Amino acid sequence: MANIAEMTPFQAVTRYFDQACDQLGVRDEVRNLICTPDREMRVEIPVRMDNGDLEVFIGYRIQHNGSRGPYKGGVRYHPEADEEEIRALAALMTWKTALVGIPFGGAKGGVQCDPRKMSARELQALTRRFTRSISQIIGVNRDIPAPDVGTNSQTMAWMMSAYAEENGYTPGVVTGKPLELGGSGGREQATGRGVSLMIKEVAKDLNIEMDHSKIVVQGYGNVGSWAAHYLDQSGCNVVAVSDVNGGIHNSQGLDLAQLKTHMDSTGTVIGFKGAEDITNDALLEMECDFLVPAALGGAIHIGNAAKIRARMVVEGANNPVTPGGEAILNDRGVPCLPDLLVNAGGVTVSYFEWVQNIQRFPWDLDRVNGALEEILVRAYREVRDTVAKDKITYRAAAFSIAVDRVVKALELQGLP
Ligand code: NAD
């Protein structure tokens, strides 16, 4: 196993898995079986670009573990979406679905491309070709993709349509769809809503007043912007947010409605009149109650963890804190609420969407939000109680609960 300072994302997730196995006394042969992804598919995606050139993209769908149900996980469009990262994200989905107790396994997909530089026609062609290439291994009872970084409800609509060409109308093959195509109310907001619910719960336990507590959010996309919105509504002071271009700060709290107007016209948070521009590095190092990294993996690492001045780090993104970074945070007494709990709201409402599609029976928004809160708060309390009982970190507790469920599901079905 690599030194924690240099771990790849998959080595990091495997390390957490191994630590949970040590704690639970899981046998080596079972560890090896679970650790090895069930299936990895790499596909070539030729796309005729608008300028007439034929470009060849590479895509992946990695199914990590299906012991507890059909594989489930997002599809990422990003220049750095390589096999190693997708494998790590697929494994994390196995632990996330197990932790919140929804009947899915874990998977992830990705295409190495820069969607910001592609036209809608090019993106549609890429999505349809990718879907056809993986259509043998996805399906409503096999593997159900969803949006992630660089993809959205429009991408899911194209995936659903491309899948239907061969298999007939099957809305439950993807989640995160537009409402008009069988999407669920509350799905777009679900991950950010979950982040805010988790902060409310942990704040109560740590005796931190929500009112006027200072929040800093790195990454103002789907997860970060909705988390900021719900935290603002709960009385918190969202003092700084950022995107790939940089950050903004206002010690009195940002006016998020005005920020939305600014973003609608400029496409970025920077240059907002109600705040000063800052760098992403400065944003991460600001003093605050809750720092929410909600962009990409590896944001807090061995190089900057000593400078983090938050009371707590709440992982909105997947793998935003490296193992080396977390070791430094732990030494400094800065707890870290882990991704598999904090951002599980998205997959939870994806589960509700799948249920509604299968039953052909839509739920109203109150039912979605009520069931989401019930599932996430229960998962939070299980993690918190395990932390108290076993004197371990929030992450170790979350992995321990999740790994135990997957191991039991696998063993009950019989080993080869
Ligand atoms: P998104 O594409 O909507 O937003 C990502 C945001 O991060 C954008 O504002 C982008 O500009 C910003 N960003 C990118 N690189 C950055 C950098 N270096 N510094 C600062 N900001 C940067 O993506 P999203 O759906 O909000 O996902 C964010 C994270 O949350 C990812 O790790 C994703 O895997 C995870 N996640 C998303 C969901 C979901 O439902 N969307 C669910 C669970 C986990």
Image: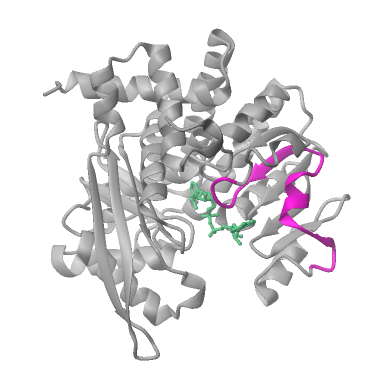
Whether residue 4 sits left or right of residue 416 in the image: it is right
Can you say whether 134 is above or below 233 in the image?
Answer: below
| Point 42% across, 36% down: residue | 11
| Point 73% across, 51% down: residue | 281
Residue furthest bottom in the image = 52
* Place of residue 83 in the rendered image (x, y in percent of width and height, measured from the top left): 35, 52
Can you say whether 179 is above or below 83 in the image?
Answer: below
Can you say whether 124 is above or below 347 in the image?
Answer: below
Given residues 233 and 269, the one toward you in this image is 269
| Point 54% across, 47% down: residue | 297
Question: Residue 276 in magenta?
Answer: yes
Given residues 46 and 143, the one toward you in this image is 46
* Place of residue 397 in the rendered image (x, y in percent of width and height, measured from the top left): 50, 20
* Place of residue 187 in the rendered image (x, y in percent of width and height, measured from the top left): 47, 52
Q: Quadrant of the N terminus?
A: top left
* Place of residue 119 in the rendered image (x, y in percent of width and height, measured from the top left): 45, 81
Can you say whether 274 is above or below 390 in the image?
Answer: below
Question: Residue 65 in magenta?
Answer: no
In this picture, which residue range is highlighted in magenta? 272-298
Q: Is residue 352 visible?
A: no
| Point 39% across, 74% down: residue | 123
